[in-house]
Amino acid sequence: MSNLRNKVQLIGNVGNDPEMTVLESGKKVIRFSLATNENYRNTKGEKVQSTHWHNMVAWNKTAEIIEKYAGKGKEIAIEGKLTSRSYETKEGEKRYITEVIVSEVLLLGAKNENKAA
């Protein structure tokens, strides 16, 4: 069971057009949000949909695939791991963020839904 440590699998819709950055070293990194939905019935029997937003980060070849094929609204499945970090804003405030580092991506939905080239 050691291969199950820190493993995340999500299916959702890309929330914004992914933003690619090429670092000085030549490595590529892409960041985007992913929305996942949960449907359930409340105590009154009414159907409720809850949306959760996740911060995603992908590197190199995976980043290139996401940039080319996974635009805003595209349904994708990802596998990766959770990571947390902190940073300081320009105003000096310390912020904390949890991200999913994407190791694999699967494009879902109809083929004609792919982002136009």
Image (cartoon, grey):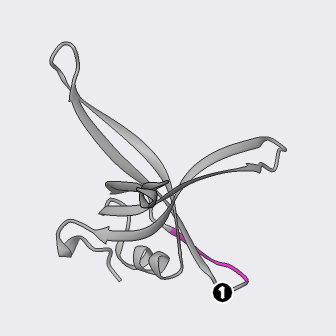
Neighbour class for label 1 at 10 Å: few (<14), some, many (≥20)?
Answer: few
Q: Position of residue 108 (x, y in %)?
A: 24, 66
- 2 shown above or below 53: below
**Is residue 16 positioned above or below 42 on the image?**
below
The residue sitting at the bottom extreme is 26
Image quadrant occupied by the C terminus: bottom left
Query: Residue 23 in magenta?
Result: yes
Q: What x and y, as percent, mark residue 25?
A: 71, 85
**Which corner quadrant holds the N terminus?**
bottom left
Q: What residue do we see at 30% from left, 42% from top?
A: 37
Residue linked to disc 1: 26
Instruction: Report the front residue among 5 and 48.
Output: 5
| Residue that protrudes farthest toward the top in the picture | 44
Tell me if 34 is positioned left or right of 109 in this view.
Answer: right
Farthest residue toward the front?
A: 1
Per the image, label 1 sits on a secondary structure element best described as loop
Dominant secondary structure of the magenta stretch? strand
* The magenta segment: 19-24
- Name the image quarter holding residue 77: bottom left
Residue 50, image x, y percentages: 32, 34
Residue 109 horizontal/vertical position (percent): 20, 65
Q: Residue at x 71, y 43 (%)?
A: 95
Q: Quadrant of residue 26?
A: bottom right
Q: Which image quarter: residue 9?
A: bottom left
Task: Tell me the kind of residue under disc 1.
Answer: Gly
Residue at 40 percent of width and 41 percent of height: 52
Is 95 included in the stretch rendered in magenta? no
Task: Give left or right: position of 83 versus 49.
Answer: right
97 sits to left or right of 104:
right
Total labels: the figure holds 1
- Of 113 and 96, nearer the camera is 96
